[in-house]
Amino acid sequence: MARLLGSELIKIKRKMILFLVFLGPFGVIALEAVNFGVRYDWLTGVYKDDLWKGLIGEVSMLSVPTILIGLTILTSMIANIEHQTNAWKQLLALPISKTKVYSAKFLLTVILLLISCSLLMVGTIILGLALKFGTSIPLVHLFKMCFYPFLAALPILALQIWLAITLKNQAIPLTVGILGTIISMYAVAFPDWVPWKWPLLLNEWGKPIFSVIAGILLGFIIYLVSILDFSRREVK
């Protein structure tokens, strides 16, 4: 698996994929820098009781749709490497199981998104310090804001990479991902069982961890189903 993952990393080396991993968190932090720069007095007045919590809340509102659209684009670009060169047959002709090939691409996507979430966390800290919000950084709260939405979005990630790998026409998974991102922006009023609501970390119990647990469990189930489907499918 390690060698397969290394091979996948080599494939994306000269692609725009790594650039997108940095672009997502950079874009969110840049927009919030402009937001606070333009409305500094008003925002610091609104969040005067806890400036760091206010900043984290503002960042989180942008980070959720960024994660969803980001994983949509990343999964499509990673899968499209083989689609563009018609290399699936050659790849699967090697003495490597389909399960490992699929898992390597899934794991690569997870790693890239975790890097992106880490950069978002670091960027938020830098922005807060630059805005002179002090050094009493609520690291636990910040960690949850940066990583919980991604973990809650694992079912969406599993679905997107399943579609991206099994469908040569990437317009379909991209359309599904974009529509899902739009739906998530209005998912506050949705029932708690809707997966596109889970990255918002909102539920009737008021416990974000429940959304995370649901995301991990359903994500794992979809991952297993997609592996079973891919292993039986005749990929061209």
Image (tube, rainbow, N blue to C red):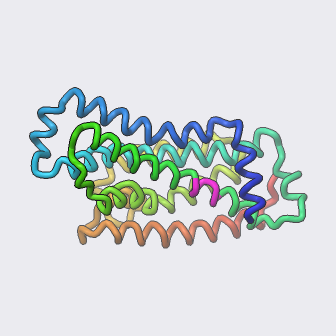
| Residue 175, position as x, y percentages in the image | 54, 42
Tell me where residue 218 appears, x and y as whole percent: 50, 69
The residue positioned 34% from the left and 33% from the top of the image is: 31
Residue 124 lies, with reference to residue 155, above or below; the image says above
Q: Residue at x 39, y 61 (%)?
A: 148
- The relative height of residue 11 versus residue 147 in the rendered view (above or below) is above
Q: Is residue 144 left or right of residue 95?
A: left
In this rendered view, identify the residue nearer to me: 213 or 204: 213
Q: Assign the magenta stretch its main secondary structure.
A: helix
Q: Is residue 110 magenta?
A: yes
Image quadrant holding the N terminus, namely: bottom right
Quarter of the image holding residue 209?
bottom left
- Give how far across and how far down residue 153 sits, in percent: 46, 58
Q: Would you say residue 92 sits in the magenta stretch?
A: no
- Left or right, 151 with respect to 8, comes to left
Task: Using the image, determine if residue 187 lies above or below residue 220.
Answer: above
Total marks shown come to 0
Residue reaching furthest to the top: 38
Is residue 183 among the parts visible in the rendering? Answer: no
Q: Is residue 81 left or right of residue 180?
A: right
Q: Which residues are magenta?
A: 106-111
Q: Is residue 5 visible?
A: yes
Who's the residue at 28% across and 69% down the image?
Answer: 207
Question: Where does the image place residue 36, in percent across and percent down from the top left?
Answer: 23, 34
Q: Residue at x 16, y 38 (%)?
A: 43
Q: Residue furthest front?
A: 135
Viewer-nearest residue: 121 or 234: 121
